[in-house]
Amino acid sequence: MTARRGRRPVPRIVARLMVCAIGVLASGCGRGMLDGQSPQADRIALLWWLLLSIATVVFFAVTALLGYALFRRRGGATSRFEREPRSEMMFIIGGGGVIPLVLLVVVFAATIATMAAASNDGSSDEMQIDVIGHDFWWEVRYPGQQATAENVIHVPVGRDVRFNLKSDDVIHSFWVPQLNGKTDMIPGSNNSTVIKATTAGAYQGRCAEFCGIGHACMTFILVAEEQAQFDQWIAAQRARSGALPDPQTQDNGECVGPKASGVTRPGDAASARAKTEGAP
Amino acid sequence: MTAAAGRLTRAWGEKNFLTTVFGTVDHKQIAMRYMITAFVFMGEAGTAGLVMRTQLAVPNNTFVGPDHYNQVFTLHGTVMIFLFATPLLIGGFGNYFVPLMIGARDMAFPRLNAFSYWVYLFSGMLLYSSFFAGRAPNGGWFAYVPLTGPKYSPGTNLDFWALGIIFLGISTTSGAVNFICTIFKLRAPGMSINRMPLFVWGMLVTSFAIIFALPPLTLGASLLEMDRQFGTHFFDPDAGGNPLLWQHLFWVFGHPEVYIMFLPAVGIVSTIIPTFCRTRIAAYSLLVLASVAIGFISFGVWVHHMFSVGLPPLSLAFFAAGGMAITIPSGIQIFAWIATIWRGDIVWKTPFLFVVGFLVTILIGGFTGVMVTAVPLDWQVTDSQFIVAHLHYVLVGGVVLPIFGALYYWLPKITGRMLDERLGQIHFWLFFIGFNLTFFPMHFMGLFGMPRRVYTYEPDYGLTALNLIATVGAFMQAAGILVFLANFVKSMIRGDDAGDNPWNAGTLEWATTSPPEPFNFRDVPVVASADPLWDAPGETKWDDRLEDPRGGQREAYGTSVVDADVSEMLVMPGPSYLPLALALSMAALFVGILFQVFVVIAVASAVGLCAVALWFWPEEGNGAAI
């Protein structure tokens, strides 16, 4: 009786939480990792939902056990655990050791499978783009096409693109949440990551490793478009004059704003760096 | 006061005010200093947290600029980890209660203990003075090179950090050596290793972890200082150095450090639960094994902080498995606690409330911990607000909640006065709800793409409401802490008398007066079980042979490591100014290195060497054995 009365409100709370969670997700996740627009991001999001499901079930199971242990009616009689120490040991080893072990095997297998899928080797016709991190902007080069860009990356939609990532100064990290996880850009070493955008659109990208005073402003836009538009854009980039771009950061390191419109200006923040270091 | 107590007080008490303040070696005095100092640091670092949350309350806020913001989050992390949680748990609770729980009269090396405190105080002051000099470190508590190297961080900001960390490491390491020796050699007769309280086990494992985890940090910080001050190139990629070397050295320390804080907290939980459930802890041996296992495994998981640096898949898989393996001993602990509660008869008091809060939050921190060991998922969430949420669920939910539980539990022993139950519950609910309001939304912020360590964000990410909720929660937590302070003041003014054992607990710290006399126990307990005070009357015996100290010396039993059979008589050292002198000269040495004043370096070194020589000068009659 007690147990049934105690159990009743729980589903209602669960339901309410689920509704809240869905509401929050629907309103906000439009540009995050859960709204993937590439096979890589989709696989990672799948792994997330798997882990979240396991965690949710285990959380409610364990808190229900805890709640029962706390609030069970104590009629003065000794508990089963006291009468049978072996049942207590089985409860602890089974619940705390064996079940987690089984779940972890599943989680580990899913991790390895996702890792293989998300860090795929690309294909033979993959396109190469070099991205070089600077304080606090992104230099983009299209090898073999004599085209460059700053803080804007255009890619053809539906094609494997390998980003060769380097840094010119400190450690930065290349992150487009809707397309793939982060890959660090480390001075003195070469990293790469493959992205295949399946939907045309403009995606927010940003530096994810703390890199100094302009870190918050170090963003870029990745535009995935049809091959014809992409070719036009490349031609324009090839023909443009090499004027010095506007900085993304002000002298005190604050972002040039407001950036609410999603417009990111190309930039070179040497002045911000010079200012904070007191160098000429 | 009996005649025996008078004789013991003459042997163990301090002679006058000056020796008390500057020369005391009493572990309880030193522990209280640790606690107060750690709380002052927490107040400062907590304020830094509030500054960050205020800045992030609304998008495009201008409360603090990026430069100030970077200093504030660097100090918040550095101070909370190094100057608050670790010293409070180890130097504060460990120092006060390990000797009491094992029935000892003091720590094994009382002067080293005093030295540890002074070094902690001075290194903390060194770190914090940078803030007042307007040169606070601004490279994050993890201080990644090359950003923190000489080229990108000129000025002394980072030198304050690196030297402060090296200096503090001396304190932490000497404390760890002291605990290992105390726990191995000074346990009351009969307290064989399978009767040791679980908090003492936690301290033992943590002390070993410190001894292995601190050297990489000290080495890393030393190499960084050499790069910065003497022009070496350990981390400079242009000259053949490697920035990833720093990350390995830092996280080989940094990950075990999480468990260095977590294991004593877990010990606190294993202490509070049986007391308020009126029953012995379930699966004692499994809990001990779990602590030891976590201590070992914690050294095999550091790379999960580095999953996105471009390591080969095989090593990623190895460290993913290592990180997940920690779930098994943690699961055993959770179920052992639930079983104890199940079996027991619950007394709902504030310490227990905090422990229940801990059990719920650590589950969430544990789940997100598994998520970040799942490599590809980590590629998405690392360096995002998701990690901020995760680490605070582990460190606030898993460490700070037990700390508050321990304060309500143990302060009556320290002050002799009870804290107010009603204020305690208000404190708990304010802090617990505030904590969840602050950090739960951060999971979503990370999933929506908000990185860490950014001083502002744009309003078009669905982040505005989440951030505002988090800021409200942060101020609720602060209000909870203010209620605690009020509670403490109230208890000091007119709290109920605690008596020896207000909670009817089973461990030895409750067998003496509150607060304990300088000598802790008049007679030495002879222990026959893991919860001596719950034994049938007469089972725990009291050995009165040390009641009359020969020649007024500080006598204590030394016992064997496993069975705790009395093996020797130790004569413990009395008060001394030398620990303070040595710590002061070392502080001067570090300041000299910081500003490269060679006269100061030379003088400080000379004074320090003299202090060491005097400290080790053989004394007549010291160290006699039976």
Image: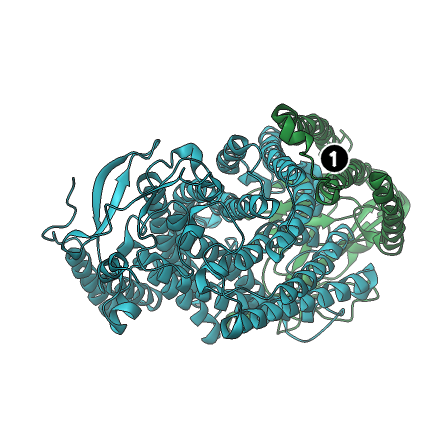
Chain colours: A green, B cyan
Amino acid under label 1?
A: Ala
Q: Is residue B265 above or below residue B460?
A: above
Where residue A106 sits in the image (x, y, percent)?
Answer: 73, 27
Looking at the rendering, in which quadrant would you find the C terminus of chain B? top left
Q: Secondary structure at mark 1?
A: helix
Where residue A46 sits in the image (x, y, percent)?
Answer: 81, 36
Tell me how many marks there are.
Answer: 1
Picture quarter containing residue B611? bottom left
Left or right relative to B183: residue B318:
right
Residue in front for this viewpoint, B594 or A130: B594
Looking at the rendering, in which quadrant would you find the N terminus of chain B? bottom left
Left or right relative to B612: residue B145:
right
The chain holding disc 1 is A
Where residue B391 sits in the image (x, y, percent)?
Answer: 62, 51
Question: At 65% from the left edge and 70% from the top edge, which residue is drawn?
Answer: B479
Kindly give the residue lying farthest to the left in the view shown.
B620
Where residue B375 sits in the image (x, y, percent)?
Answer: 67, 37
- Residue labelled with disc 1: A118
Picture quarter containing residue B585? bottom left
Can the viewer see residue A132 in this picture?
no
Q: Is residue B67 above or below residue B612?
A: below
Question: At 72% from the left edge and 56% from the top edge, which residue is drawn?
Answer: B442
Residue in front for this viewpoint, A222 or B331: B331
Question: At 34% from the left edge and 52% from the top edge, which residue is drawn?
Answer: B521
Left or right relative to A142: residue B155:
left
